[in-house]
Image (cartoon, grey):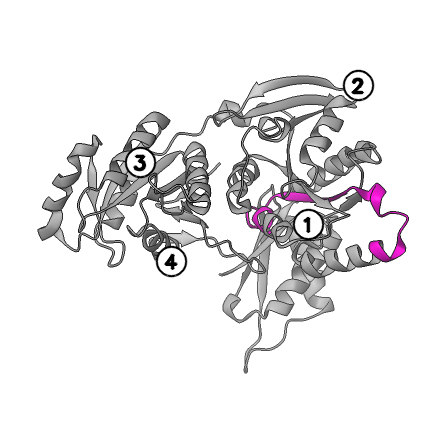
Amino acid sequence: MSPIITIVGRPNVGKSTLFNRLSRSRDALVDDEPGITRDRLYAHIRWNDSPLTIIDTGGFDDSDHEPLIKKVREQVVKAIEEADIIIFMVDGRQGMMQGDGDIADLLRRSQKKVLLVVNKIDGPEHDHLVNDFFGLGMEDAHPVSAAHGYGVKALMENVVRDLPKDDPEMEDNGGIRVAVLGRPNVGKSSLINRILGFERLLVSELPGTTRDSVDTLFSWHGQEYLLIDTAGIRRRGRVKEKIEKFSMIKALRSLERCHVAVILLDAAAGIAEQDARICGYAFERGRALILAVNKWDLVKKDAEKKRLLDGAIERQLQFVSFAPRINLSALTGERVKKLFERVDLLYDQFCKRLSTGAVNKALEELTRRNPPPRIGRGSLKFYYGTQTRIRPPTFVVFANRPDKIHFSYKRYMVNQFRERFDLTHTPIRVTFRKR
């Protein structure tokens, strides 16, 4: 699970500037999968081979009680709760302000690891300005210029040094790890409660890796499953998230830990932008996913509504067209038991491992059937391929000119691998390297 780094501070201290620099820096390798629209507030990066999720937040102003400002403040508090490390940014040119002290008090109460960052320090000759902020009671202050890059690399080295260590025992609790995800009010709590309400289930709750997180282990027909972070779903109304963007934080955490993501869609309301965004996050992270269309009982007898829903799914979720779909009703229980039959089949594909011999035989046959197009006066040659990992199945194909392989031929090879190896419903990755 990649740690979450949250940037907080008063309005206009430079939080978004730092976020933009980190997400576009050559030192930070930003995930870039095709077909995904990114939410600007989130960036998945790697710094010194450490995966991180960086979150930008709105400006925190504890003195203004206007409704919109109050909402922003609530979301910042929520982001702080979810963070592993907090970057607390202040304005070195302005000096310490009352709002900085208010935020510092809030952060101390959170008991999270906090790095104080004094922004708008354009060079070492201005480092002395950090002394103005010792009154905040923070251990260290990091002088940076988010706009020009001064001090940012040193800051991130400190962030990586302080990252929480993964708990391997937590990741090996047993069972297929399943996360139920979806936009607000789509029926996540109803589905979880319906699943856990079946009589033959053996249910136990296990502490999760985050504060207030509970994972639920249960057995179904001899197979164990671990439902990820059921506390955040089942305790309805415990934390009211007023802006949908910040409900993504828990989804990101759950996606990092699950094998299979059940993306819950609302048959009655149709497909929304946030549905595509959640599917996009699952696709980015290489998770197996199932499209579970909830509230099917409300539309199944209306041919026109079903036609419109099918069209919307085909158009808006085309980039995950490989994902299996199941129509169900959490309210009535219709087809909910069938959901875990799909989970089992999908997980088998997700974990499938193939011999190098099988991969190379397929590579030889598919290139003979449909030879790659010529490149200038030369020809494109594929030497051999191998599977390098599972979850998801990942293949590397070695060629003489990998940079010249057209995207349509790459798509052809991916589709052929899916068909030949019975990987029709799992995400797979095929990369090309020069030999």
Q: Position of residue 45 (x, y in %)?
A: 42, 49
Gap between marks 3 and 2 measured at Cα:
49 Å
Q: Are marks 3 and 4 in contact (CB under 8 Å)?
A: no
Which label number is shown at residue 24? 4
Q: Tell me which amino acid carries mark 3.
A: Ile
Going from N to C along the chain, the mark reached first, 4 or 1, is 4
Q: Tell me which label, 2 or 4, sits earlier in the chain.
A: 4
Identify the residue position indicated by label 1 in the image. 358
User: Residue at 56% of width from left, 48% of height from top?
Assistant: 281
Residue bearing mark 3: 103
Identify the magenta region. 280-305
Q: Is residue 93 left or right of residue 394?
A: left
Q: Report, in whole angstroms, how far the alpha carbon at label 3 lies from the one at label 1.
A: 58 Å
Of the residues under marks 3 and 4, which one precedes in the sequence?
Answer: 4
SS at badge 3: helix
Which of the 4 quarters of the picture holds residue 312?
bottom right
Disc 4/disc 1 C-alpha distance (Å): 39 Å
Q: Which residue is mark 2?
A: 200
Disc 2 is placed on an element classified as loop
